[in-house]
Amino acid sequence: MPATPALSAGLRLLLPVFLLLWLFCLPLAVAVYTPWTYQLYCHWNPRCEQLGPDKTRQSITELNRFFQHRLELLPSPPWSAKEVLHMQEVRGLYDTAFGAFLILGLILALDFFGHPDRRRRYGAHARRAMLLSGGLLVLMLVIAPFFRHFWLEVFHPLLFSNELWRTDPRDISWYLMPRGYFLAVILFLLSGTLLLTALIGWWGYRRPPVPA
């Protein structure tokens, strides 16, 4: 049954957003489930030196294993009790994001394989998603000079109803994940999403090769 004009218009609005969110989850998975971002940022983070190389490596491994559900709880000590509780909340958010990734992937796959002009269609969706992701990246660059206020007064109060996320030098998180780390990761996530949408948009724009 052909889609109604209202449904088609709704899909044109929603599917680029779904594609954007689905692609955003790919660099997010790299940041959450691998040690790469922590290790790289330690080159610019003097607090890693204060923590020491061995303890830094061990803490990164523990955090990755915890987010991967290969570790039930972070060991306390060295992780403080409030860190353990906060990281459980954070892991719940990441688990929700992973579930959304699967659901969005299913929706996008059903739509993709349900259309003969899927390449052109998803190229168009990706170009709209690219505009959205580019806008978010520009917005984040504008916010960057005021990131401390955004991080402390806007972002965390929206997501958490407690103060467990606040850290001090007694917490492992204070050394591994200062505010600058999160700004760098957010820029990585948005830049990665922009790149992925651009690649899909280019793929959809290119003419498929003509059979010989």
Image: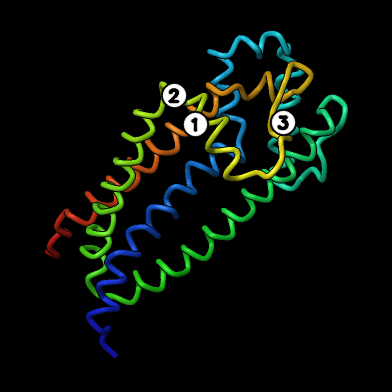
* Alpha carbon distance from label 1 to label 2: 6 Å
Q: Is residue 11 left or right of residue 187?
A: left
User: Residue 182: horizontal and vertical position, in percent?
Assistant: 54, 29
Pointer 2: residues within 10 angstroms few (<14), some, or many (20+)? few
**Residue drawn at the location 24% of the way across and 57% of the way down:** 123
Split into 4 quadrants, where in the image is the C terminus? Answer: bottom left
Label 3 or label 1, whichever comes before in sequence order: 3
Q: How many marks?
A: 3
**Residue drawn at the location 46% of the way across and 63% of the way down:** 105
Q: Label 2: state its secondary structure.
A: helix
Residue that sits furthest to the right in the current view: 77
User: Residue 154: horizontal and vertical position, in percent?
Assistant: 53, 37
* Alpha carbon distance from label 2 to label 3: 31 Å
Instruction: Pick the residue in front: 93 or 120.
Output: 93
Q: Nearer the viewer, mark 2 or mark 3?
A: 2
**Mark 3, residue position:** 61
- Vertical placement of residue 4 versus 118, above or below: below
Residue type highlighted by circle 2: Phe
Pointer 3: residues within 10 angstroms few (<14), some, or many (20+)? some
Q: Is residue 75 left or right of residue 168?
A: right
**Mark 2, residue position:** 146
- Vertical placement of residue 26 versus 113, above or below: above
Instruction: Pick the residue in front: 184 or 144.
Output: 144
Instruction: Pick the residue in front: 212 or 56.
Output: 56
Residue 150: numbered disc: 1
Q: How is the image coloured?
A: rainbow
Residue type highlighted by circle 1: Phe
Q: Based on the displayed image, in which of its 4 quarters is residue 119 positioned?
A: bottom left
**Residue drawn at the location 61% of the way across and 56% of the way down:** 96
**Residue drawn at the location 47% of the way across and 68% of the way down:** 106
Label 2 or label 3, whichever comes before in sequence order: 3
